[in-house]
Amino acid sequence: VHLIESGGGLVQAGGSLRLSCAASGRTFSSYAMGWFRQAPGKEREFVAAIHWSGGMTYYADSVKGRFTISRDHAKNTLYLQMNSLKPEDTAVYYCATDQNPHYGSRWDVDDMDYWGKGTLVTVSS
């Protein structure tokens, strides 16, 4: 599975961005896809995930109500709509796939099998 993120950039606090993740390869075998982020000096953290077939979604508490994850099967693309952005949302955002069944409402870095190279989101105050 090959993943390429896009859509990052510089935005003012309160603004919006939509990230995309184009997937190629054995995406039909993905159980779920998700977004993680890593701020400077911090560990990579879970942001959101979606079951690739059923569409059930999961969010970190820090983004619930502001971010929306979605996917387009026909385009093999994952999205993350980010609204009401805050300076603390500044990070490199990564998409990733989980090829195995997962039980629970959040994913850890070790749960994911394939990663993109990331796209930088900078939110200015």
Image (spheres, grey):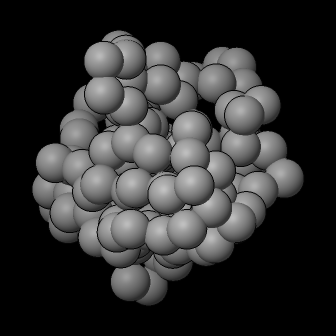
Asked whether, in this view, residue 62 is left or right of residue 52, the answer is right
Looking at the image, which residue sits at the far bottom? 74
Looking at the image, residue 24 lies above or below residue 59: below
Residue at 44% in and 85% down: 74
Left or right: where does residue 114 sit relative to residue 76? left
Judging depth in this view, the residue of 114 and 109 nearest the camera is 109
Q: Tell me residue 51's x, y (percent).
A: 60, 48
Q: Residue furthest right?
A: 65
User: Does residue 51 appear anywhere in the picture?
Assistant: no
Residue 121 vertical placement versus 36 (above, below) = below
Q: Give how far across and how far down residue 37 sits, in percent.
A: 42, 37
In this picture, residue 40 sits left or right of residue 56: left
At x 27%, y 57%, the residue is 119
Residue 44 visible in the picture: yes
Q: Quadrant of residue 53?
A: bottom right
Q: Is residue 94 left or right of residue 46?
A: left
